[in-house]
Amino acid sequence: MPRKPRNHMEGTIYHVLNRGNNKDNIFIDKKDYHVFLKFLWEQKEKNNISILCYTLMPNHFHFLVKVSAIPLGKFMHGLQSNYAHYFNMRHNKVGSLFQDRYKAFHVEENQYLLQLIRYIHLNPMRAGLVEFLRDYPWTSHHDILQLKSNLIDLSVVVDLFETPERMLRTYQQLVDIKNDTLSSPPYTLPLPTLEHLLRTVSDHLNVSPKSILSDSRIKNAVSGRQLFCQLAYEEFHYTRNELSGFLDISLSGISRYLDTKNKSNDKTKELASIVKRMLNS
């Protein structure tokens, strides 16, 4: 059965990651890293996608992207299929290089972006690959410090500040290695997609996603929309505009679901815990 396409919203920022099949290495030597970055640049240009930061690890990768009118899936398909073909040919391998299609978590820009860049860049230190971040060549950490890059779009990050100089000072404080315990990420978790939350609510209430997305007034469908809105808004900080677009409901309708007196606080907390455990697994 073919997979359903992911929901697409132009201008959305995603934390994208994938790892090698069976956790095997996807980069063997320097040439592999360079070729992957070449394909990353080509697909960025082809699909008009902004790369905000990246880290390549021996058996997985992380990056932040801001999508255009072209869906993220098209960009990722081009990147992973081109690289997998190159890798298997060069290293005489067969079969799937990557563990899965990929994971993509929506990022609420103002709240998580800088902390997420920090978390992504510090991965090599967490893994014990280097003692100092400056010694690891396969991240965009160096691009940000130099305020110059052919690959990442510094303007999106700089736009959060008044000047590039202020952005640089803040970033340097953010990755102050001397004071970093390198434990868990400083933000809560990468945000799950709205589809992910919809499926969680659907499973919990035993009501189909189609019913929740419809305008049905059946009690379970209404309860599902209410719980979905409260879970996405209160626990994972999606905006009312995003919920309105996803459910095709007016902003006043979204507000009614969020402002109802019969909020299911225990249920939203319970479902949020389930989602977070899944993201951590």
Image (cartoon, grey):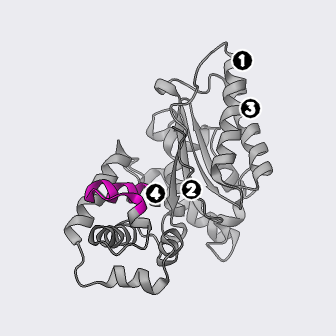
Question: Disc 3 to disc 1, how far (Cα)?
Answer: 13 Å
Secondary structure at numbered mark 4: helix
Mark toward the viewer: 3 or 1: 1
Q: Which residue in the rendered view is the most extreme toward the left?
A: 266
Q: How dense is the environment of label 1, judged by Cα within 10 Å: few (below 14), some, or many (20 and up)?
A: few
Please state the horizontal and vertical placement of residue 270, each as a whole percent of the image. 23, 60
Up the image or down, 238 lies above or below 41; here it is below
Question: In front of the other: label 4 or label 2?
Answer: 4
Residue denoted by label 3: 35
Q: Secondary structure at mark 3?
A: helix
Residue at 31% x, 69% y: name it. 227
Along the polypeptide, which appears first: circle 4 or circle 2? 2
Regarding residue 174, the answer to whether it shows in the image is no
User: Quick check: 105 above or below 136?
Assistant: below
Q: Which residue is mark 1?
A: 89
Check disc 4 and report the residue beneath it.
Answer: 195
> Is 147 on the left-hand or right-hand side of 172?
right
Instruction: State how far apart marks 4 and 1 are (Cα).
Output: 36 Å
**What kind of residue is marked 3?**
Val
Disc 3 from disc 2: Cα separation: 23 Å
Q: Position of residue 10 (x, y in %)?
A: 65, 65
Dots 3 and 4: beta carbons under 8 Å? no
Residue at horizontal 75 percent and vertical 52 percent from the top? 47
**x 35%, y 80%: residue:** 258
Which stretch did the figure color magenta?
Answer: 195-210
Image coordinates for residue 117, horizontal then vertical, percent: 55, 55
Element class at badge 2: strand
Q: Nearer the viewer, residue 213 or 204?
A: 213
Q: For marks 3 and 4, give the one nearer the viewer.
A: 4
Q: Are marks 4 and 2 in contact (CB under 8 Å)?
A: no
